[in-house]
Image: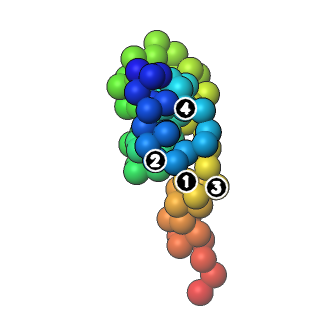
Amino acid sequence: MNEYLVEIAALSGIVKTLGNRIAKRTFATTITFLNGVPIESVSKVMEHTNIRTTQLYAKMLDEKVASDMAPLREIFAIV
């Protein structure tokens, strides 16, 4: 798989070395986590036995935190 990622990077003009770990992190963070998939489901899909392993890949992003907190801002907004 890493060889394919290297080839994709070269064809796409990406100068960063791509590998299995980056692919997993991208899947967990960009594809699933930022699209509202719960971390428990991501953990199951990635076949992690411990959710802490998934947390290593699915780094918390400011964008995700802001969207998660938006409903609270509406509830507690001063009118």
Q: Amino acid at mark 3?
A: Asp
Relative to residue 62, is residue 47 drawn left or right? left
Mark 3 and mark 1 in contact? Answer it, CB < 8 Å.
Answer: yes
Looking at the rendered structure, which numbered label has been put on residue 64? 1
**Of the residues tagged 3 and 4, which is closer to the observer?**
4
Looking at the image, residue 4 lies above or below residue 58: above
Amino acid type of the residue tagged 2 in the rendering: Ser
Q: Nearer the viewer, residue 8 or 48?
A: 8
Identify which residue is drawn at 60% across, 77% down: 77
Distance Cα–Cα, label 3 vs label 1: 5 Å
CB under 8 Å between discs 1 and 2: no
Residue corresponding to mark 3: 62
Dot 4 lies on which element? Answer: loop
In this view of the protein, can residue 40 be seen by the observer?
no
In the picture as drawn, the residue positioned furthest to the top comes out as 49
Q: Which residue is mark 4?
A: 18
Residue drawn at point x = 61 percent, y = 49 percent: 61
For image coordinates 38% across by 31% down, the residue present is 41
Residue 66 against residue 35 in the figure, above or below: below
CA gap between label 2 and label 4 equals 12 Å
